[in-house]
Amino acid sequence: MRSATPKLLHPLCGRPLIHWTVAAAREAGAGKVVVVDGPARALDQALDGEVEVAVQERALGTADAVKAASNHLQSTGTVVVVNGDNPLFTPQTIQRLVEAHDRSGAAATIATAILEDPGRFGRVVRAPDGTVERVVETKAAGDASALELEIQEVNAGLYAFDGELLQTALSEVRADNAQGEFYLPDVLPAIRRHERTVDAYEIEDPLETLGVNDRVELAKVRAVAQRRIHERHMLAGVTIVDPNSTVIEAEVEVGPDAVIAPFTSLRGNTSVGSNSTIGPLSTVIDARIGEGCTIVHSYITGAAIGDGVNVGPFAYLRPGTVLHDGAKAGTFVEIKNSDIGAGAKVPHLSYVGDADVGDRTNLGAGTITANYDYQKKNRTTIGARVRGGVHTSLIAPVSVGDDAYTGAGSVITKDVPPGALGVARERQQNIEGYAARREEREETPTGERPATSPTSDQSAADEDAGESG
């Protein structure tokens, strides 16, 4: 992978690769799941306490990896082994493999697939009676003959074994190959030497054989996994207008009759209620979207949105934001760690951070809550049915009572009582003839003053406005 991140921790549609394999095993009914890791136990961060971890001290091959897990395996019953970097195996495929294994009475059953281009897959060599004789690896020159390379049936990387015989066969595997590794498929001839049968189960979808060894293969696997996710949602009643331009991760939940417009990404633990329209060009991460919402051209992360809420276009809702039923966050609005009441509106060009806004309040364009005094975050409290004037700045900690108003352009630093009008701005002063005097001064040579001088108040205003301009 050419990465500092272990391969099985690379994300695939919102889950690390190892999660896909573990989840498939659990859903297939595995009584115990054992993950084989290296001595650094890099996978611990992605595994829960219900998964047992076996440590392979040195990377000596797949048979050695299974052998490292021997103490975790039952000596009786069926043991299923699956390659950790094959995330596309479905629970149904694992179940069918086990069922085929049980029906046949074989000591081992391997999943196989017929591929037009087998590539580097191990080739399945059949015995005259149709059972599996051996699997020939193709990782390095010399592993397989030219004739064996012509075989199109490949080992898919999924096995079912008789637990007791597997333990015996593992001890008989030798590293007699170009890689000098202990290959798990080499247990198959060992099992046959014990006069037991090795059978094969051909999987229905050859795409399940796709594994991940580099970023190119990861992209191919991601395309298949994403298509499956899209199909699952569409079959459940979700409209995805253009699946090719839409990203929906594995843990996302979407209700029926929702519409996902093009160039939308739904990621993490996101849920979208029924009849909501998300997008186009929207990103939603770890957020809850209620029913009947409209989210257009917006970025939402860590927010909770009630029913019938309108967001965007070009809104940014940050973690801790709560929009109750019927609320609105309009164009170029940013909200962070704030509670916006039912029916309240933050229509456009505003920043609301660390604030509580009451029901049916309407904040004017350009409203700002200044919530940081360089030492701590302070909250702003705005009551219900408040009407905020445009370009109002609220300097926290401050509160505005129910049914209050703020004048346009005000900087509110003191509490506004319920029902009151808060106005905090410099009184306007008009300077008559200012433009003509400015023009006259600009035409006067440097160091000279015009023949007529304005009043002292006018001079001060001239300098105040002119110098700053």
Image (cartoon, grey):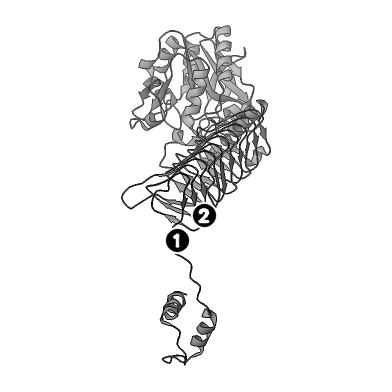
Q: Please state if 459 lies on the left or on the right of 289 as rendered.
A: left
Disc 2 versus disc 1: nearer the observer: 1
Q: Is residue 329 above or below residue 90?
A: below
Callouts 2 and 1 close, C-beta under 8 Å: no
Secondary structure beneath dot 2 equals loop
At horizontal 43% and vertical 23% (from top left) the residue drawn is: 63
- In the image, 147 versus 344, the foreground residue is 344
Residue 366 numbered mark, or none = 2
Image quadrant where residue 148 sits: top right
Residue 425 numbered mark, or none = 1
- In the image, 51 versus 64, the foreground residue is 51
Q: Is residue 198 above or below residue 418?
A: above
Question: Which of marks 1 and 2 precedes in the sequence?
Answer: 2
| Residue 19, horizontal then vertical, whole percent | 47, 28
Secondary structure beneath dot 1 equals loop
- In the image, 420 versus 77, the foreground residue is 420
In whole angstroms, how far apart are the C-alphas of marks 2 and 1? 15 Å
Q: Amino acid at mark 2?
A: Gly
Q: Is residue 53 above or below residue 333?
A: above
Q: Amino acid at mark 1?
A: Arg
Visible residue check, residue 49: yes
Residue 182 numbered mark, or none = none
Q: Please state if 277 lies on the left or on the right of 367 as rendered.
A: right
| Residue 187, horizontal then vertical, whole percent | 46, 18
| Residue 415, horizontal then vertical, whole percent | 40, 48
At horizontal 40% and vertical 11% (from top left) the residue drawn is: 74
How crowded pointer 1 is (Cα within 10 Å; few <14, some 14-19, many 20+) is rated as few
At horizontal 53% and vertical 80% (from top left) the residue drawn is: 433
The count of marks equals 2
Q: Is residue 247 above or below residue 50?
A: below
